[in-house]
Image (cartoon, rainbow, N blue to C red):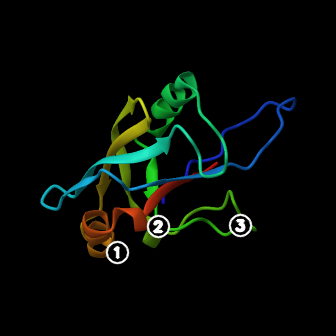
């Protein structure tokens, strides 16, 4: 659900597409405040076979603070295109590092058409939803 904007790179840097997923395990829903607290943003071990060091997780945690969370991924043929307002779901806040990865609070738009579905899944089936970065 989360999508990071591509950063500017120097001509000597190689560009690599990166996509990772962390399930919403461990999160607790505060419907009144419009927050899913303690969602896993980045795990130490990736489902894509990558393993992140402590330093990489700490660095990533700083980049996740305040980042927008969108519903679904952008069109693969247009990875840097603008996102639709209807895809905007929320932002990540209070990002912290734990031994197994980066966690934070997902502050969401309570009026988003999928808010009830996402919060129900977070409460009842957290393994069915996840945050993923697409950078």
Label 3, residues with CA under 10 Å away: few <14, some 14-19, many ≥20? few
Location of mark 1 (residue): 114
Q: Which of marks 3 and 1 is nearer the N terminus?
A: 3
Question: For the view shown, which residue lies furthest in the top direction?
Answer: 55
Q: Do the residues labelled 1 and 2 touch (CB within 8 Å)?
A: yes
- Mark 2, other Cα within 10 Å: few <14 / some 14–19 / many ≥20: some
Residue sitting at the far right: 12
Mark 1 or mark 2: whose residue is earlier in sequence: 2
- Residue beneath label 2, please? 71
Residue 112 visible in the current orientation: no
Of 70 and 57, the residue lying toward us: 57
Q: In this view, does 88 lie to the left or right of 34?
A: right
Marks 1/2: CA–CA distance = 9 Å
Pick whichever, 59 or 108, lies toward us.
59
Q: Any mark on residue 58, and which?
A: none
For the point 26% across and 74% down, which residue is it?
Answer: 116
């Amino acid at each position: 659900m989360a999508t990071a904007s591509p950063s500017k790179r120097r001509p000597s840097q190689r560009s690599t597409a990166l996509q990772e997923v962390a399930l919403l395990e461990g999160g607790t829903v505060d419907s009144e405040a419009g927050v899913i607290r303690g969602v896993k943003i980045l795990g130490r071990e990736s489902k894509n076979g990558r393993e992140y060091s402590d330093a990489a997780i700490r660095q990533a945690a700083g980049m996740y603070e305040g980042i927008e969370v969108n519903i679904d991924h952008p069109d693969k043929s247009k990875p840097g295109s603008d996102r639709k307002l209807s895809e905007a779901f929320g932002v990540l806040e209070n990002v912290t590092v734990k031994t197994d990865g980066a966690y934070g609070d997902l502050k969401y738009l309570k009026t988003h058409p999928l808010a009830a579905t996402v919060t129900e899944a977070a409460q009842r089936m957290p393994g069915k939803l996840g945050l993923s970065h697409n950078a």
